[in-house]
Structures are given as structure tokens and as C-alpha cells.
Image (spheres, coloured by chain):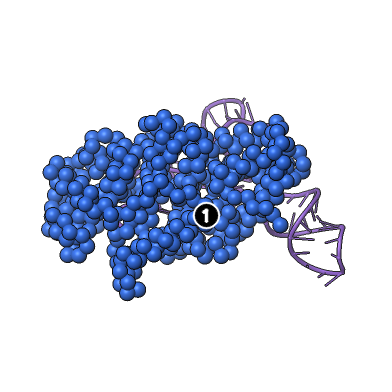
Chain colours: A blue, B purple
Amino acid sequence: MKIFNTRTGLKEDFIPQDPFEVKAYVCGPTVYDLCHLGHARTYINFDVLKRYLISLGYKVIHVQNFTDIDEKIDQRAKKEGISPHEVAERFIREYFFDMDSLKVMRATKYTKASEYVPKIIKITERLLELGYAYRSGNTIYFDVGAAGGFSELVKDLNETIVDEIRVQGKRGPFDFVLWKVTGQGFDSPFGIGVPGWHTECVAMSMDTLGETLDIHWGGKDLIYPHHECESLIAKTLTGKRFVRYWVHNDFVLFKGEKMSKSSGGKIYIRDLLEKYPAEVLRTWILRSHYREKIEFSEESLEETQVLYEKICKAAAKSRDKEEMGQCAKDFAAIFMSALDDDLETGKALLAVEELSDRVLEGKVKGAWRIFSLVETILGIRLRAPH
RNA sequence: GCCAGGGUGGCCGAGCGGUUUAGGCGGCGGGCUGCAGACCCGCUACACUGGGGUUCGAAUCCUCACCCUGGCUCCA
């Protein structure tokens, strides 16, 4: 199949290192709140890629993390009078509730940053030894300049802008935190404190999947700094390519703006599930290509509900396991080639919609096979209409 | 400012060199109905941000503007 690689900016043929196995790492959420639609999009899109790769015969080893060390978690814990650990555990449970509802397949392995602290410390020590890290006051920084600068995903970072928010004591404006001594948190040779975000993912992904990953997926907002920094850390540690295919999905917008931590315009999956079936939410997300932004609106969700019901109706009508006619074969080919081309789920669904129309007109033989692909690959359960 | 992605009919949204210029929502007319809704049938929008250019031919390619969204160490 072809997949768009953020590193090269091109659609590339997907060729994993091992011809039968795909190693994929997905950046999971920071567990301080319920998941919003943006999270749903990231994990559903990756889920379809995973299901598609499985349908092609690959064994997919999918590792996903939970970032359970974070100031926002501490803040929430303080506010609710419980421990940060309890906050993290609660939102991990909530994450699974939402994702299970949305029929997102479970990862092969879930990791937690807090369980990787010894490994993160080891990496930090190694970077200090190699001369790619330094201590300044209470912080260990990664020396971006010494490592040759950023080059993996981001070009032409504007130094003058970033310079304005530069922290005193850094050697270079782009240097980032590897360990911050705060007096509380985790014990380390550098002092009691907390690790930097980027090292966490490097430690977790390399430990579980090895030095080179086939796919590293995440929301577009993680390209810089998170993924760029991860990449530089990994490269200085191993000298090898860290990730073969970097894949990033675009955002869900609400009132024209990104749904994010700071803007406040969040729509929780939980709230939507009270109004719409999970299948409709999933279909709504998959109607758009993963690299395009989606504007949230109740109206489009309602349209999707109509579409979903139509597909269900057509699927129910196609239950006889008869041979596929030419028409069904053509639609199956369109469906699969759409997914093969950089996961064009919108086009695939368009084909399903058209097929459904024809089925309802009684013009297609053997369409059940395509509806079963909708269920297994797109992960949209087609419920019997009533 | 720099980088990335966009600007298509009242709205959402396909199309990405030339055929019948998707589809949906809405609107309009009809059927059904005691009325309304739902549903069904039909009709309706020759629209592609603006200026140059390439071409026999451009919404589709090039170029310059303008505008929108996102990133530029909280982010999925």
C-alpha cells in the first residue's frame, strides 16, 4: 500500500523491515481528562490502518503509551484531593471505555511512562556521557546543536521567534528538557524530579519494538517538538534510522479552531455517545481522509447517521451469501484500492454508499462480501435496522 | 515573520487537464397523511477567491496576490 510519510512529504510504498510483521508505535494520551473527538480521530484512523494491514496478511505489533507523568495530572489530583496516580488510573480506564465503545482494537501492549523511569534515566545518563546533554542549574538539557540540529520532520524553524521564549541557561534555543529536578517525583542520579516528555516515548518504543520502528503515528500537533525531538534522541543513541514511516493525522476543528487543551472548545466522546451510536461517530470520522481537517457539526453527524442507516439497510438486504456479481466485484476493487492509496477511507465509504443505493434498488448480487469488509477493516459494525 | 495545508453552488463536500461537471443538507413541487413529521417521487444550484500565464482545452498545471486553518517547545 501507499502511505504518506511526513519525513519526506511524499506518498511512499509501505515496506516494513520484516515482510510479515509491522512494528507500530502510537503516541497515546496524557491521562488527565476524558478523551475528546480529536483523540477519537487519531486512534480510529490508526485502527483502520492496522485493520487494513492485518487484512493484507501482516502481523501488526502495536504499542501505545499513556503519558501518566504530567503537571496537568498533578493539578487535577490537587483539585480533587486524590493522588496523581489515581487520576492517571481513572483516565486510563475512561480511555478504554471510550475506545472500546468506538470499536478501536486493543494494542498489543500498553506502556506507562511512570513504569519506564529507570530506562529513561539510563538514556539520559548515556546522552550525558556521549556529550549530547548537559546540566544547567536544576535541569538536564539535550544539546540540539551538538547533535547536529533538527532535520527529520521540521525545516527552517524560525530561531528569532523561538528565541523570545528561550529559557535562561540553555546553550541553544531549541535545547529541550531531559530531566527536571523538582524535589518531588522520581529518584534519579540527577536529583529527585521528573523526566522530559520526549525521552519517555523513546524509552518505551525502543524497549518494546527495537531501535527502528516501521510506523510512528500521532496527531499532527506532535510533529514538533515531540516527534522531532524523539527522533534526534534516538538517532544520537543508535546511529540508526528511528522511524521508517512517520504518519500524522490532522485535527478535528470546533468553530473553526483546533480542539485543544488551551482553546477549551473540547467535545468529549462520552457526551457524543449519549446522542449518537458509536458506529455513527466512527463513520463520521472515516468519511474524511486522515490528513484533512474535519469541522465538527451536529448537522454532519446527523447526515452520517442517515448514511449509516442506509448502509445497514443495504447490508441486511444482502445477507444471502450468494456469489459476487460483476458489479459487486467492481465495488470491492474500488473499496480496497481506496484504502490502499494512503488510507482513503472517505473514498471507500463513498463506494459503499453507492453500492448501498444499488443494493436497495435490487441491482447487485453478492454485496455481502463488501459489507463484511466494512465491518472488519473499517471497523464499523452494521447493525440490523428495525 | 517562517513552515505546512487549504479557499468549489445558500451550506457541507467529491472532482485534481477535456465525457452526463458526485453525493448530501437546504429550497421548491407532488405522493402518503385528519394535520404535521418521517418516508417515497420529481425539480432546483453549469459554482469553482482574484489577477496573469501554459494549453486546442483548466476548478484541475505554473506564477503573483488576497483570505482561512494549523505548527513554531501544553497538545491527538
The spot of residue A103 in percent (x, y) is 52, 52
Residue occupying the point 29% across, 35% down:
A241
The spot of residue A13 in percent (x, y) is 44, 31
The spot of residue A296 in percent (x, y) is 53, 57
Tell me if mark 1 has few (under 14), some (14-19) or many (20+) residues whose alpha carbon lies within 10 angstroms of its own: many
- Is residue A70 visible in this depiction of the protein? yes
Residue occupying the point 14% across, 59% down:
A191
Between residue A197 and residue B20, name the one nearer to us: A197
Residue occupying the point 66% across, 32% down:
A329
Q: Quadrant of residue A358?
A: top right
Q: Quadrant of the C terminus of chain A?
A: bottom right
Between residue A223 and residue A237, name the one nearer to us: A237
Between residue A309 and residue A289, name the one nearer to us: A309
Q: Is residue A77 above or below residue A206?
A: below
Tag 1 secondary structure: loop
Between residue A31 and residue B22, name the one nearer to us: A31
Q: Is residue A4 above or below residue A96?
A: above
A381 left or right, relative to A167: right
A377 left or right, relative to A155: right
Residue occupying the point 63% across, 56% down:
A305
**Pointer 1 residue:** A102
